[in-house]
Image (tube, rainbow, N blue to C red):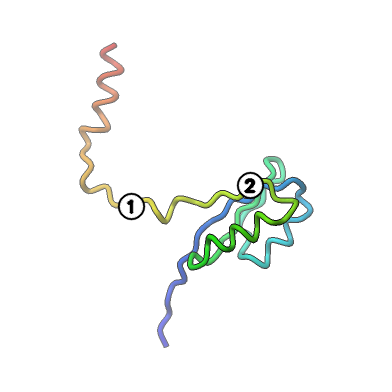
Amino acid sequence: MTFAIQPRRGLYIYLKQMRHVSQLKKFGQIVYVSRKMGFAMIYVDDTAITQQIEKIKQYKFVKDVVSSPRPDIKPDLDDMHDDIFFENYDEESAR
């Protein structure tokens, strides 16, 4: 038996009322809830992300749903040079 990692993606769900957070459990794992800023972060399976976002947006207590861009970001910075980071600093200090 082999273990396979299930690809997941984070969704930031902005809510009108925080008392409905428990209803989001059926879509995925609730990771973080900010009562002050009015959002919840959940992890959902990445296979059918667009359908899940559309289902979540249908609820009346949901203001907006934002998908995390992290899986789309390339983690390798091998082609980037240190010179690029210091060029902006040198230009600002020369002014």
Residue at numbered disc 1: 75
Q: Residues within 10 Å of mark 1 (few under 14, many from 20)?
A: few
Residue at the (68%, 61%) spot, across then down: 24
> Which of the pair 12/88 is nearer the observer?
12
In x, y percent, where is residue 90?
Answer: 25, 21
Q: Residue furthest bottom?
A: 1
Q: In the rendered structure, which amino acid carries the disc numbered 1?
A: Pro
Residue at the (61%, 64%) spot, across then down: 29
Q: Residues within 10 Å of mark 2 (few under 14, many from 20)?
A: some
Label whose residue precedes the other's in the sequence (1 or 2)? 2
Above or below residue 20? Residue 38 is above
Residue 6 located left or right of residue 40: left
Task: Answer with the quarter of the image where residue 94 lies.
Answer: top left
Above or below residue 43? Residue 64 is above
Image quarter of the N terminus? bottom left
> Which of the pair 8/1 is nearer the observer?
8
Q: In the rendered structure, which amino acid carries the disc numbered 2?
A: Asp
Task: Answer with the quarter of the image where residue 22 lies.
Answer: bottom right
Q: Which mark is residue 64?
A: 2
